[in-house]
Amino acid sequence: MSGIQVECYSGFKSEERPLRFRLGEQVLEVVEIEDQWYGPSQRYFRLRASDGNIYLLCRDEEKDLWRLEAFRSLPRGNSL
């Protein structure tokens, strides 16, 4: 989909997990990482953000680039 700016926690590895990300002018905090998995050169994170919605972020480790892969709008108070 699109490139986004992501601020990460860096522990043992650099950019271990996203803490917050910027979509346009909006900055969203990561409330919960619901799942994560690996591709050949990617890391995927399905997360719930501070706006209550679900986002799928992908970090392409070869290109050092983050992408928004998917978005799901949830009514307030609902979960998957």
Image (cartoon, rainbow, N blue to C red):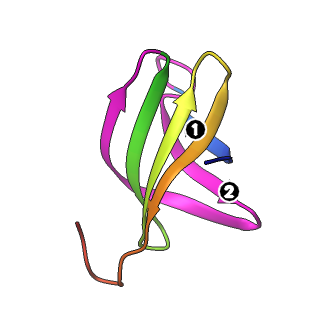
Residue 9, x across and y down, in percent: 53, 35
Residue 75, x across and y down, in percent: 35, 83
Q: Nearer the viewer, residue 54 or 16?
A: 54
Residue 77, x across and y down, in percent: 28, 82
Q: Quadrant of residue 73?
A: bottom left
Q: Which comes sooner in the sequence, label 1 or label 2?
A: 1
Q: Which mark is residue 8?
A: 1
The crowding category of the residue bearing disc 1, from other C-alpha atoms within 10 Å (few below 14, some 14 to 19, many at least 20), is some
Q: Secondary structure at mark 2?
A: strand
Q: Quadrant of residue 64?
A: top right
**SS majority, magenta:** strand
Q: Residue at x 62, y 53 (%)?
A: 21
Q: Secondary structure at mark 1?
A: strand
39 shown above or below 17:
above
Looking at the rendered structure, the kind of residue marked 2 is: Arg
Q: Is residue 37 magenta?
A: yes
Q: Which residue is mark 2?
A: 22
Q: Residue furthest front?
A: 1
Looking at the rendered structure, the kind of residue marked 1 is: Cys
Residue 63, x across and y down, in percent: 68, 21
Q: Nearer the viewer, residue 64 or 9?
A: 64
Q: Is residue 22 magenta?
A: yes
Q: Check the picture and name the quadrant holding the C terminus.
A: bottom left
Left or right: 34, with 59 as reference point: left
Q: In this picture, which residue range is highlighted in magenta?
A: 11-40
Q: Are marks 1 and 2 in contact (CB under 8 Å)?
A: no
Q: Residue at x 66, y 63 (%)?
A: 27
